[in-house]
Amino acid sequence: MLVVHTAMLREFRLAPGAVSRVPPGARRQAAAVDRHIGFLCELLHHHHTGEDEHLWPPLRERLPAGALPLLAAAEEQHAAIEEALSRVAAARRRWAGCPDAAARDALAGALRDLHALLAEHLDAEERTLLPLAAAHLTEPEWLAIGEAAVAASPKSAMPLVIGMFAYEGDPEVLATMLHSAPVLVRLVIPRVAPRVYARRAAAVYGTPRP
């Protein structure tokens, strides 16, 4: 979970700058940046959907009454983040239709707002709910959260997803994330994924090591 959080926080922190660096009218560069933002937004949506469906329900049944307000606060934060994702989507559509300075700056602002909400939510989740989840969930229940997110993502996106996680992630944790994949995937993806992410980072951020 912490590997996923670290990667998403990094990417959403970098995203406003990537948008702001696109000159007005540079449609090809705008399309490359927009593609990555869309990928990030989908990844975040699926991650939160996995928590909504596989993390919150068992926690609600097992947490002591005094801890339930923490869960309610996290659910409210998820709702706020989904609203922010909708604002980002609307700003992306405007920028795609007319990549001028005003649309670009509006999208960068919407992404900064989203990052602020996400940073607040993940900090609270890591400090309060994840320790409780570790105490109350079984290992299969933990794995179901990640498996749901993987199942919702296109297989063609997995090298990029794993490469993004591997950029700052613990190799042992990444190996655990791939434990149920076929042997060939477990052998090939860790070697290919960093290069896939480096190419994407160079296209979006101007450097393979953002």
Image (tube, rainbow, N blue to C red):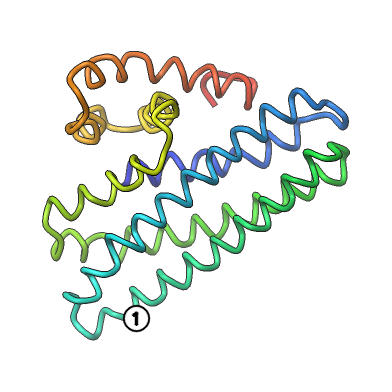
Q: In the rendered image, which residue does mark 1 sit on? A: 69
Query: Relative to 69, is 38 on the left or the right?
Result: right
Q: Amino acid at mark 1?
A: Pro
Residue at 55% from the left image edge and 46% from the top image edge: 41
Q: Is residue 17 above or below residue 115?
A: above
Between 34 and 117, the one nearer to me in the picture: 34
Mark count: 1
Vertical relation: 142 (above or below) 101? below
* Drawn side of residue 133 relative to residue 151, left or right: left
Locate residue 120, reporting x and y percent: 48, 61
Q: Position of residue 4 (x, y in %)?
A: 37, 43
User: Which x, y percent locates residue 188?
Assistant: 28, 14
Where the C terminus falls, by quadrant?
top right
Question: Horizontally, is 26 left or right of 157 in the view?
Answer: right
* Quarter of the rendering containing residue 195: top left
Give the image quarter of residue 61. Answer: bottom left
Residue drawn at x 49%, y 55% as measured from the top left: 119
Q: Residues within 10 Å of mark 1 (few under 14, many from 20)?
A: few
Left or right, 20 with reference to 121: right
The kind of secondary structure element at disc 1 is helix
Q: Position of residue 153 (x, y in %)?
A: 41, 39
User: Image quarter for residue 156?
Assistant: top left
Residue at x-position 72% and y-position 45% = 92
- The relative height of residue 208 versus residue 46 in the rendered view (above or below) is above
Identify which residue is drawn at 51% across, 22% down: 209
